[in-house]
């Protein structure tokens, strides 16, 4: 049973390694008329957001960072996250 777990572990490590390698290789097909689907993580007051565009045709992935929105203080309290000035 221990050996079995060990094999699973090695398998997971190998898979994540393959994942990393393929990650560097997502330029897609240059002749493709890309059609992107968007996955948006919204920026918060202090953290960057991220827009991940994935081409449904060739698998090209483009990532864009969006800037933090900054606190929006009203009467000393941020209306977005509740932070106090
Ligand atoms: Zn494409
Ligand atoms: Zn805030």
Image (cartoon, rainbow, N blue to C red):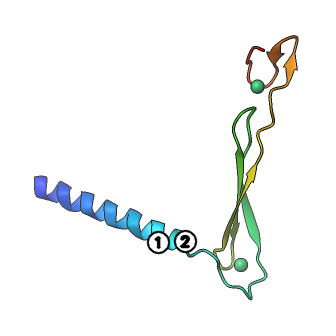
Taking depth in this image into account, of 14 and 71 the one nearest to the observer is 71
Relative to 74, does residue 53 appear above or below in the rendering? below
Tag 1 secondary structure: helix
Q: Residue at x 74, y 88 (%)?
A: 31
Cα–Cα gap, marks 1 and 2 = 6 Å
Tag 2 secondary structure: loop
Taking depth in this image into account, of 58 and 80 the one nearest to the observer is 80
Estimate how packed mark 2 is, as few (under 14), some (14 to 19) or many (20 or more) residues with alpha carbons within 10 Å: few
Residue 77 image position (x, y, % from top left): 80, 14
- Residue 40 visible within the image: no
Q: Is mark 1 within 8 Å of ligand 1?
A: no
Residue lying farthest to the bottom in this orientation: 31
Relative to 13, does residue 33 appear above or below in the rendering? below
Q: Which residue is mark 1?
A: 21
Q: Is there CB contact under 8 Å for labels 1 and 2?
A: yes
Point out the quarter of the image occupied by ligand 1. Answer: bottom right
Q: Residue at x 12, y 52 (%)?
A: 2
User: Which quadrant of the figure has residue 34?
Assistant: bottom right
Relative to 33, does residue 53 appear above or below in the rendering? above
Horizontal arrangement in the rendering, residue 26 relative to residue 34 (left or right): left
Q: Which residue is mark 2?
A: 24
Label disc, if present, on residue 4 of the rendered structure: none
Q: Is mark 2 within 8 Å of ligand 1?
A: no
- Residue 20 visible within the image: yes
Residue 26 image position (x, y, % from top left): 60, 74
Residue 51 image position (x, y, % from top left): 72, 55
Taking depth in this image into account, of 64 and 56 the one nearest to the observer is 64
């Amino acid at each position: 049973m221990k050996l079995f777990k060990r094999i699973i572990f090695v398998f997971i490590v190998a898979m994540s390694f393959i994942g990393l390698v393929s990650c560097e290789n997502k330029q897609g097909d240059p002749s493709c008329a890309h059609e992107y689907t968007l996955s948006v993580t919204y920026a918060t007051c202090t953290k960057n957001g991220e827009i991940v565009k994935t081409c449904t045709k060739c698998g090209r992935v483009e990532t864009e960072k969006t800037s933090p929105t900054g606190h929006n203080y009203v009467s000393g309290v941020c209306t977005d996250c509740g932070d106090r000035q």
